[in-house]
Image (tube, rainbow, N blue to C red):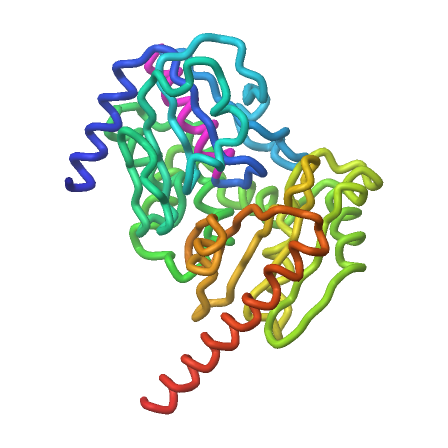
Amino acid sequence: MTKKATLHRASQAILAAHRPLLICHVAPDGDAIGSLTGLAQALRHLEMAPIPACADTIPAGFEYIPGVERVVQRVDQPFDLVVALDCSDRNRLGNLTDLPRFDQYRLVNIDHHITNLEFGDVNLVDAEASSTAEIVLSLVDELDVPLDETLATSLLVGIVTDTRGFRTNNVSSRVLKAALRLMEAGASLPYVSLHGLDRRPMVVVRLWGAALSLLDFSEGVIWTSVPVAMRREVGYQGNGDAGLVSFLLSADEADVSVVFVEQEDGSVDVGLRASPGFNVAQFALKFGGGGHALAAGFSTPGPLGEAERRVLAPLSADVARQRASQSQTSSLE
């Protein structure tokens, strides 16, 4: 089925509903929240009553995104459709899949990760897109919803944060044209870049400081951990690393960065980032996770120390293999 046909199917499924439940992934990032709030705003324009939800608490620092205050963690209202946003697999929806009658309704899966398992009844998945927000923009066009400043701002957040300010290797003229449209509709690139990339609450700085005290590095892999006790001590309410894994990759010597985040139930979320030329998506897939070449993740059983040992040895071997492959390719050129 062509992308245009899938886009039409997704729009028709949404238009047939009145109160769709929109869900982004646990430990949400800028693309997840931007796509969630952006689609919710578009559907309200169509006089629908969307329910934007996330199983995890929205971390501090996302207050600048329009509509984020309407995102709920508990869903008590009835719904008639499920839309998954920025989720490579069903597990990324968190405990919201336990809602009564969840499986009785159609599920529209909107995502850009190459490892997406296409778990929806309609799978609007485009691995060539820079972000899920870019796909949502195409869906907004298909729904014939006009762009305004707040809608455009939410979607620009998704594009800017997932491309790290237009610096990832999937940035194309198509991405820049999408960003230009959003700016012409009123979204401010300086404002989004400042709050999405450069500014963060003091509690996040304290979390990073604590986590950096556990920093380690070996053979191109840089890593640290965020225990539950650490988050409690600094007062951080989120369940992720607040973007630390991307910051670690700024080290000149790093090919891949990893952050292990212990969860309340004892499991460990593993976030991965890679420098251009390396790929962490396939490694994450082996552990039941997913993502794309430069950014991926998965969940693994605890305790934290055992999770680190379980992951770091094969990851180091994988990075060494990729480095050797690059050297061999270079010698043949």
Quadrant of image for the N terminus: top left
User: Percent x, y for residue 52?
Assistant: 48, 22
User: Percent x, y for residue 90?
Assistant: 43, 35
117 over 35 or under it: above or below: below
Q: Residue at x 45, y 56 (%)?
A: 286
Answer with left or right where residue 116 lies relative to residue 187.
Answer: left
Answer with left or right where residue 10 lies relative to residue 329.
Answer: left
Quadrant of image for the C terminus: bottom left
205 over 85 or under it: above or below: below
Identify which residue, 113 or 31, lies in the foreground.
113
Give the magenta range. Answer: 32-47
Identify which residue, 262 or 81, lies in the foreground.
262
Q: Residue at x 35, y 28 (%)?
A: 147
Answer with left or right where residue 220 lies relative to residue 36.
Answer: right
Magenta run includes residue 24? no
User: Percent x, y for residue 158?
Assistant: 46, 41
**Residue 272's quadrant in the figure?**
bottom right
332 over 194 or under it: above or below: below
**Residue 125's quadrant in the figure?**
top left
Identify which residue, 28 or 133, lies in the foreground.
28
User: Percent x, y for residue 82?
Assistant: 38, 22
Q: Main secondary structure of the magenta part?
A: helix
Regarding residue 16, the answer to whether it shows in the image is yes
Number of marks drawn: 0
